[in-house]
Image (cartoon, rainbow, N blue to C red):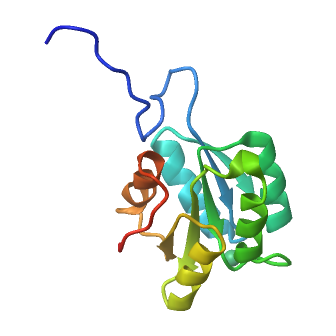
Amino acid sequence: MGGRKRIHLLPAGLRKGEIMKAKVLLIEDNEQNRYLMNFLLDKHGYAVVEAFDGPQGVKLAAEELPRLILLDIQLPTMDGYAVARALRANPALENIPIIAVTSYAMAGDREKALAAGCTGYIEKPINPATFMARIERYLDNPPTESSP
Ligand code: MN
């Protein structure tokens, strides 16, 4: 193996002990879901920023410029569709993947989420075995959705 190795920014972000971790913003009002997603992301080396509602999420997204946003659709006061539209209205955020977190039963939510500007979706309840793989594909791939 000769020559210089190209250094990639790994989808998992930088490893522990390195200078920066990839930042993920969670916009989720349910404490258990927040806790689980935070736990999984932290375990895989991400820095997590949490918002409990839409307005706070939109504000934090602009301040933190995360690598990825996980957006619950069922939120109080401002639902996930409105949040996605508000995020996409900010040019600084236009390339950040937004992953809608939707109830499995609510199939129509997915199309609405994509129409509102989300990049893809994952279903609730969160499956800890597949969660990281499901979201990490959005870190390297262009913002297009394929079937799960
Ligand atoms: Mn919710």
Q: Residue at x 80, y 42 (%)?
A: 63
From what the image shows, is residue 115 above or below residue 16?
below
Name the residue nearer the viewer: 115 or 132. Answer: 115
Name the residue nearer the viewer: 100 or 16. Answer: 100
Q: Is residue 113 left or right of residue 54?
A: left
Q: Position of residue 126 (x, y in %)?
A: 48, 70
Image quarter where ligand 1 lies:
bottom right
Name the residue nearer the viewer: 9 or 103. Answer: 9
Asked where in the image residue 26 lies, by quadrant, the reply is bottom right
Q: Position of residue 139 (x, y in %)?
A: 47, 47
Q: Position of residue 61 (x, y in %)?
A: 75, 50
Can residue 127 be seen from the camera position used here?
A: yes
Asked where in the image residue 119 lies, by quadrant, the reply is bottom right
Indicate the quadrant containing the N terminus: top left, top right, bottom left or bottom right.
top left
From what the image shows, is residue 106 above or below residue 139?
below
Q: How many marks?
A: 0
From what the image shows, is residue 18 above or below residue 103?
above
Q: Residue at x 61, y 76 (%)?
A: 115
Q: Farthest top residue? A: 3
Indicate the quadrant containing the C terminus: top left, top right, bottom left or bottom right.
bottom left
Q: Farthest left residue? A: 1
Q: Is residue 87 left or right of residue 97?
A: right
Q: Residue at x 74, y 45 (%)?
A: 92
Q: Residue at x 37, y 22 (%)?
A: 7
Can residue 53 be seen from the camera position used here?
A: no
Q: Position of residue 55 (x, y in %)?
A: 85, 63
Q: Is residue 108 left or right of residue 72?
A: left
